[in-house]
Amino acid sequence: MEKFNKIKTMVLTVDGNKVVAASPDVLTNQRRLGRRHTLEIYNDSDIAVLFGGEDVTLESGMPILPNESRMFPVDDPEAIYLIAEKPADVVIAEYCV
């Protein structure tokens, strides 16, 4: 993994409406964070959370199982979307350079 200068973490609640896996700071491109190069998603719920692109659905998403995490080497703040059958909390960590 590339070295990072800052890390931004936050809890995000996912439900039947897809949400972008990014903090408001990264979405608004605040310079103090720098460029995001890696995204980590930890599923802190008791159901699977599904990820995919902007067209993700409950049928097409790839699962992140409960208590599992996934890392994505990506700098586009709107590259990964999340969805779940019912409300589920995930923790996202954004590694920035």
Image: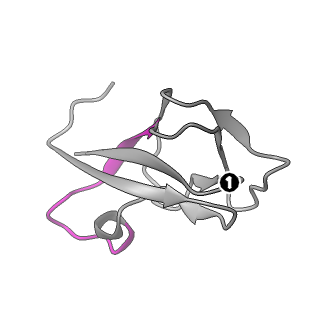
Q: Nearer the viewer, residue 26 or 91?
A: 91
Please tell me which residue is depicted at 64% across the width and 38% down the height of the picture.
48
Q: Position of residue 52 (x, y in %)?
A: 68, 48
Q: Quadrant of residue 29?
A: bottom left
Looking at this view, name the residue that lies furthest to the right: 59
**Residue farthest toward the bottom in the current orientation of the protein:** 28
Residue at position x 34%, y 75% from top?
28
Quadrant for the N terminus in the image: top left
Mark 1 residue crowding within 10 angstroms, few (<14) / some (14–19) / many (20+): some
Q: What residue range appears in magenta?
A: 27-42
The reply, left or right, for residue 16 in relation to residue 24 is: right
The location of residue 85, given as percent across then percent down, is 72, 53
Q: Is 35 in the magenta?
A: yes
Residue at image location 28% in from the left, 68% down from the top: 25
Amino acid on which the number 1 mark rests in the picture: Gly
Identify residue for label 1.
53
Is residue 40 depicted above or below 26 in this figure? Answer: above
Location of residue 7 by image quarter = top left
Quadrant of the drawing holding the C terminus: top left
